[in-house]
Image (cartoon, grey):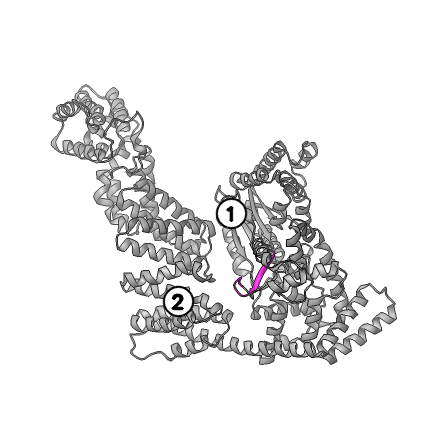
Amino acid sequence: MNSPISLYNPRSTPPAQLEAMLVGRDALLKELLDNLHAQSRSRTRQHWLLRGPRGMGKTHLTGVLHHRVRGDARLSESYLPLWLGEADVYEVYSPATLLERIAERLVEAVPDAKLAATLHTLEGVGDEEGFFQELSSHLGEEAERQGKTLLVLMENLDALLESFAAKEREAQVRQLRSLLLHAPHFLFISTTPTRYMVELTDPKKPLYNQFKERDLRPLSVEEVGVVFSKLVELTGRKGMEAVLGDRQDGVLRRKVIHQLTGGLPRSVVMTFEVMRDKTGIKALVEDLRRLLDAQTAYFEARLARLAPRERAIVTTMALASTNLTSKEIATRSRLPERTLSTLVSRLVQDGHVEPTSGTGGKGTVYGLSEGLFRLWYQYRKGRLLLEPLVRLLAYLFNPSELQETIARLQRHVEENQPDSQDSAHLALRQVEEALRLATSEEGRLDRERLWKECQEEATAIRDARQTIDQLRAFVSKYKNLAPRKKFPPIIESALKVIQRLPAPLATDCISWFNASMYVLSLHSPVLATRQLHRLLNFLESQDSSLRELGPYTHLSLGIIHEKSGQVEEALRHIEAVILAKSAYKPRVGPFPLEMARWIRAELYKKIGRTPEAIRDYSHVIESALRSGGIQTSMGLHAANALARVHEKSGDWKQAKQAIHNLLKLSDSLPFHKRDRQLIAGAQLRLIFNKMALGDPALVRLLSSLEQWIKENPHHQFIDIAQEISTRHAPIMNMFSERNPQRRVTTFLSNPNAFYSNLPIEQLRQLIKELEESASPEEAPLVHTHALVAETLDATILNAPGAKARLNRALGRLPPELRQVVRERIADEQTRAPTQPPPPKRRTNSSSPARPAALRSAADPLER
């Protein structure tokens, strides 16, 4: 078998081959599929955006997702996947025309859909609101008929937004937002090659926070080896031991390939094609030319939207063979250097340019964010040499191998006499230029430098692997051992290895070192903090990006001090994590920042700074709801803590909202990761909170409570739940009783429960109904209860004469019931205004007093 591998068109690639070639994306794919499973049971929609430069595998991942949904029995029952390609987006200029493309794909997927006939009868202009609304309505109806959510897999969200005309853009973006927010029959998973889109990052824009975003990262050195192994299996090509082997030369060659390709999956596949048959670059050149031609519409549109001077900067950088400093850009473009920094900053912000070394000041080197743009622009300018291919050939093969390839290509050209501009001639030119570069002094030195750097990094990779394996072993074994006085030797050796590793390799080692120190702190906090301070001093003394790893170590120190009860010291380190982002722009992602805020909230709560604790808990929850992923579990626990803070202060409305957020976050977790005890406890407290708020649907709440008791017989709060249920049993019995006379008897047998827990209006209405059904013997007593209920509101508001009237009525009731009524009045008066309010339900108050029946039994829930 010697099958060709599709480099640029996953849409036409067989599903089995897409699956076989999926490398380095398994965790993200699982997260997406788990989220789709969770959303299949929800009426709200969380839309996704996948970011990554061209060639990073976004379309490949989209294709795998498309086929997985279609092939999964549960998902295919819930979703109808519709895959919009790049060409579809280029035909769009408004949300209405986007819906039209979706409708066309739906008809292709379901030819007998009723929508097929409807599409031919639609009239309207693509910019019209009416046309948008009509299409949205028809698609919604078709989704209902199919019984499925329309899962729209869409390429190039940036191109879609930029297609909206300037005058209509604001209105059309709002149309798109309404679709995302209010049309549950749509779920969008989009991609974009850009790193920045103002429509998504500006809080004032309509689409802010509408997508959960994930970045596709480059393949690692190890993953490059995995790709080569899979390609060998797919193509049947053997003899690739130099790349696949685990010997030092194999690791080194993979590292060279990784550096030359930047870890882009498309470039890695291209490298394999070259290595398996160097004379086969003719087909590769043809594929590259087709790819570059296909990018013309996209890149020309992006250039057209730039201001003339910004366009001059981008094209100047595209024509250069290397990345440039601001001074070099000014010299080549003839733009004044004094105004260049503003223009470059704007291009960086808009995602066209990025700093490749330095932090934005003088001497910073800038490169193009879209690596393919340079190749496309040079190609469009008539430069038929494909620079990445030339460098790959020159640095991966020695001159003698290149000469042999040239000889074979020359024979092919002479035998077939092709046109001078065809792929065979162009392929020959690439190899000839590669030989020229490889044999030049500049090329020879550059090749030696590259291989030497890679050799050093290959050695560092080996040392980093060994160190991480040792730290993992330490973490798994040391926590189960008795306290040791002897200093573990791995700690000292790990610090030495970290200090000589390049930043990318040091990151994982530092993560495991921090984890090791946390485990060590369980037995020896002093020893652990001493070693973390040594690491921190080293990191903060660096001028390189290693300095940006300091917040992780601050976080470890904060956690250890918090566990040891050293609040002030813990706060100092946690504040360092939060403030570091503005201090020196570290690569602190959302997780350590939100973890720091969570710990700070716990510390604030411990020292009584409740408002600050509420603020930080709320921030963590909002971030988890927005970002999901690894932050979800943390947000869930923060919501639980926030609910307890509000319950303790009697703010039942805010406590209820916190628990709703907890349950929402729980729904987005995979089932096997859910903390069932925590969630069950939250569900119980939500029932209690609604009771405390005076929810008029008390019977439904009591029914939910009974159901909870059946489902959680071994929960730690089961005794509390049963006690509350027992106290409310008379209410349940009375409301479930159909015989009017027996309802009266049930009420009179235990009126305490009704006075303690029913909203006053509901109590008054109930007793009024009972009066109509009471027997002659029971009627006087029921009438007395009616008098008490009628005077409760006036007494609570201290109306003139109300207290005397109440006392007269209470005089006819048993002493224990009088005390219950007085307690209820006292509870209500703690929240009643001094002046009578306008007539409305007081049960809507944001912070009602806790009913007496809940007060003693539910207190353990706050601890």
Is 423 placed above or below 643 here? below
Is 342 on the left-hand or right-hand side of 699? right
Label 2 packing within 10 angstroms: few (<14), some (14-19), many (20+): many
User: Residue 858, image x and y in percent?
Assistant: 25, 45
Q: Quadrant of the N terminus?
A: bottom right
What residue is shown at x 63% (from left), y 75% (from top)? 243
Q: Where is residue 449, by image quadrant?
A: bottom right
Q: Is residue 601 above or below residue 151?
A: below
Q: Which residue is under mark 2?
A: 553
Q: Which x, y percent locates residue 800?
A: 17, 22
Q: Which mark is residue 342?
A: none
Distance CA(mark 2)–CA(mark 1):
31 Å
- Give the number of marks: 2
Q: Is residue 624 magenta?
A: no
Near-viewer residue (334 or 422):
334
Q: Secondary structure at mark 1?
A: loop
Residue 434: horizontal and vertical position, in percent?
A: 73, 73
Span highlighted in magenta in the image = 352-361
What residue does disc 1 label? 202
Please say if 847 is above or below 407: above
Q: Closest to the observer: 819 or 554?
A: 554
Closer-to-camera residue (132/32): 132
- Residue 157 in view (yes/no): yes
In x, y percent, where is residue 283?
Answer: 76, 65
